[in-house]
């Protein structure tokens, strides 16, 4: 026979019958009996399952975020390389443009220095291959227009802010700074003014004094040499345009220095980025792990 105490112990261990419970205990009771031991076991299991799911989701979000950061990092490196390469193209363009301006300026300087000579060929140049008149090309102009496709693309997609404030200031000054705007203005609107003055001089003065205006012909500058020599307005126009070319050459010298400095700055940033070690999605810089 089971003793009364043993029977009570067994019933306590099995729990209280549901019909003996109040409304609150009935809500949290599974089955037909309520036991605190069973309740705590179920609670611990539920908490454990919750923590497993919670931290699993948390790690998943972390990995996903790191993946996005990794993609952004790679995109930033590509943008940096693209900018660096475009700046190199800009250096090539600027150098070639400056050489052209120097050549044109030197040619017209010689023309200006020969202005008073008593020679029908003072407005003609023999380059060893052909004869040509420099003033035949006086209306030609070539506004400074360096490449900027990569820069505009980065500005358009809004990723410029990820490149860092110092780099942003440098690159913005190179592409949209005052120095570049002066070069563009001088090679565009300022040169255009001198060209328009030259054309107006022909329309308002020469057409009334010269029977056949054919400035594109070498013979025109030979036949009308003395008349053109007396035109002090044209000579002054040429002098001011030569001075403008000299100013443009100086501006291009300064601009090339700035572009070259920014290329070196970008090279250093790209080098640091490429030295970073990526493990899964986590990125370690050399200085973080004692490497240099």
Image (tube, helix red, strand yellow):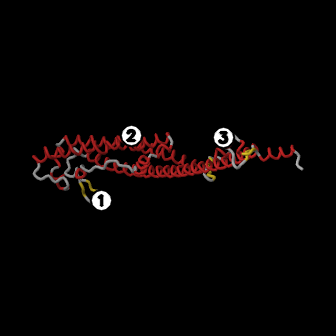
Question: In this orientation, which residue lies closer to the viewer: 5 or 221?
Answer: 5
What kind of element bears circle 1? Answer: loop
What kind of element bears circle 3? Answer: helix
Above or below, 168 against 142 in this view is above
Name which of mark 2 and mark 1 comes first in the sequence.
1
- Left or right: where 110 falls relative to 47: left
Name which of mark 1 and mark 3 comes first in the sequence.
3
Give me the C-alpha separation between circle 2 and circle 1. 39 Å
Q: For the residues labelled 2 and 1, say whether their Cβ atoms are less than 8 Å apart.
A: no
Decide: few, some or many residues near mark 1? Use Cα within 10 Å; few <14, some 14-19, many ≥20.
few
Give me the C-alpha separation between circle 3 and circle 2. 83 Å
Q: Which residue is mark 2?
A: 179
Q: Position of residue 74 (x, y in %)?
A: 53, 52
Q: Which residue is mark 1?
A: 128
Residue 203 seen in this snapshot: yes
Q: Position of residue 134 (x, y in %)?
A: 25, 51
Residue 275 seen in this snapshot: no
Residue at the image point whose x is 63% and y is 52% from the top: 279
Give me the C-alpha separation between circle 1 and circle 3. 114 Å
Q: Position of residue 60 (x, y in %)?
A: 61, 51
Q: Which mark is residue 49?
A: none
Question: In this orientation, which residue lies closer to the viewer: 283 or 220?
Answer: 283
Q: Which residue is mark 3?
A: 23
Question: In this orientation, which residue lies closer to the viewer: 141 or 2?
Answer: 2
């Amino acid at each position: 026979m089971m003793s009364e105490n043993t029977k009570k112990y067994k019933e306590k261990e099995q729990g209280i019958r549901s019909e003996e419970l109040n409304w609150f205990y009935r809500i949290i009771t599974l089955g037909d009996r309520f036991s605190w031991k069973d309740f705590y076991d179920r609670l611990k299991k539920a908490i454990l399952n919750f923590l497993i799911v919670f931290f699993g989701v948390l790690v998943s979000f972390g990995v996903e975020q790191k993946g996005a950061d990794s993609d952004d990092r790679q995109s930033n490196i590509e943008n940096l390389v693209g900018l660096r390469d475009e700046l190199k193209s800009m250096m090539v363009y600027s150098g070639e443009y400056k050489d052209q301006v120097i050549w044109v300026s030197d040619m017209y300087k010689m023309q200006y220095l020969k202005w008073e000579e008593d020679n029908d060929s003072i407005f003609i140049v023999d380059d060893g291959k052909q004869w040509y008149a420099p003033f035949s090309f006086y209306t030609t102009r070539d506004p400074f227009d360096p490449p900027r496709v990569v820069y505009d693309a980065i500005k358009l997609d809004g990723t410029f802010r990820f490149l860092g404030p110092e780099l942003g200031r440098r690159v913005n000054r190179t592409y949209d700074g005052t120095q570049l705007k002066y070069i563009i203005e001088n090679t565009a609107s300022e040169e255009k003014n001198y060209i328009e003055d030259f054309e107006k001089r022909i329309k308002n003065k020469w057409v009334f004094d010269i029977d056949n205006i054919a400035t594109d012909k070498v013979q025109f500058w030979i036949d009308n040499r003395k008349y053109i020599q007396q035109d002090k307005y044209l000579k002054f126009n040429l002098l001011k345009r030569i001075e403008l070319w000299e100013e443009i050459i100086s501006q291009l010298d300064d601009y090339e220095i700035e572009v070259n400095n920014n290329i070196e700055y970008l090279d250093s940033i790209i080098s640091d980025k490429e030295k970073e070690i990526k493990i899964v999605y986590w990125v370690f810089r050399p200085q973080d792990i004692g490497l240099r």
